[in-house]
């Protein structure tokens, strides 16, 4: 299995140290997560992929950094789909008087004391459930900022950063 995170922020494209993700629908995500699990303001969204998959819809979220497999040891929670989309669907179902257990069941905590085999099993289960539900990807979260050491090649965005800077300068002229 492979792990990726993305950013559109040029400051982090050139150096991913300290990168944190942000929920666009933060009040809904926070309310849901605090009710069922826990919410942390400092987190990194991770796209979890089977080994054979080269890309998915999560790639639309900016420049991608592939992460070291060891990042699995720090993953706190996984979702068989996109966190925000599933949480918004949960609220929609709740407002419509529907049973939301299926949505809540898409999320699974990775116990902090769980070994690698248990963590792999949880993430593989999320991949299977996402595929079965025809969701584009599995999202997992680290409850901390990204470290350079988390990335296979933390300098892979430098050319992207330079290109974006040159384009921005050309547009100003």
Image (cartoon, rainbow, N blue to C red):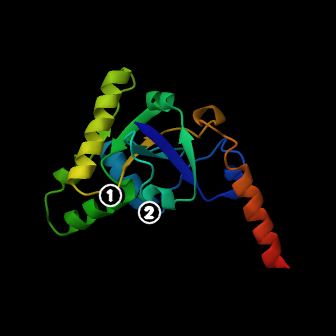
Q: Mark 1 or mark 2: which comes first in sequence?
A: 2
Vertical placement of residue 146 versus 165, above or below: above
Report if residue 44 is visible in the image. Answer: no
Identify the residue position indicated by label 1 in the image: 87
Q: Residue at x 27, y 63 (%)?
A: 89
- What's the distance in space between the residues labelled 1 and 2, CA to CA? 9 Å
- Give whichever of 103, 82 is nearer the camera: 82
The N terminus - image quarter: top left
- Residue 64 is tagged as none
Q: Position of residue 9 (x, y in %)?
A: 65, 58
Q: How many marks?
A: 2
Q: Position of residue 39 (x, y in %)?
A: 43, 45
**Toward which corner of the image does residue 48 lie, by quadrant?**
top left
Vertical placement of residue 68 versus 132, above or below: above
Q: Position of residue 8 (x, y in %)?
A: 61, 59
Which residue occupies the extreme front position in the image?
52
Please tell me whether mark 1 sits on a helix, a strand or a loop: helix
Judge from the rendering whether residue 10 lies leftward or rightward of residue 119; answer left or right: right
- Give whichever of 171, 74 is nearer the camera: 171
**Toward which corner of the image does residue 51 lie, by quadrant?**
top left
Q: Residue at x 34, y 28 (%)?
A: 119
Q: Residues within 10 Å of mark 1 (few under 14, many from 20)?
A: many
- Give whichever of 51, 77 is nearer the camera: 51
Identify the residue position indicated by label 2 in the image: 25
Q: Residues within 10 Å of mark 2 (few under 14, many from 20)?
A: few
Please tell me whether mark 2 sits on a helix, a strand or a loop: loop
């Amino acid at each position: 299995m492979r792990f990726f995170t993305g950013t559109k922020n040029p400051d982090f494209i050139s150096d991913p140290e300290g990168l944190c993700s942000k929920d666009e629908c933060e009040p809904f995500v926070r309310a849901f997560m605090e009710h069922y699990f826990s919410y942390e303001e400092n987190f990194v969204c991770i796209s979890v992929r089977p080994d054979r998959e080269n890309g998915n819809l999560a790639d639309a979220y900016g420049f991608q950094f592939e992460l070291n497999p060891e990042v699995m040891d720090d993953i706190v929670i996984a979702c068989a789909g996109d966190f925000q989309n599933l949480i918004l669907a949960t609220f929609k179902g709740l407002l419509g008087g529907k049973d939301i257990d299926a949505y809540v069941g898409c999320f699974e905590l990775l116990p902090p004391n769980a070994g690698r085999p248990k963590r792999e099993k949880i993430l593989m289960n999320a991949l299977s459930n996402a595929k079965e539900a025809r969701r584009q990807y599995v999202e997992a979260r680290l409850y901390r900022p990204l470290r350079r050491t988390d990335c296979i090649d933390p300098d892979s965005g430098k050319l992207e950063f330079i290109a974006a800077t040159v384009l921005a300068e050309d547009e100003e002229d």
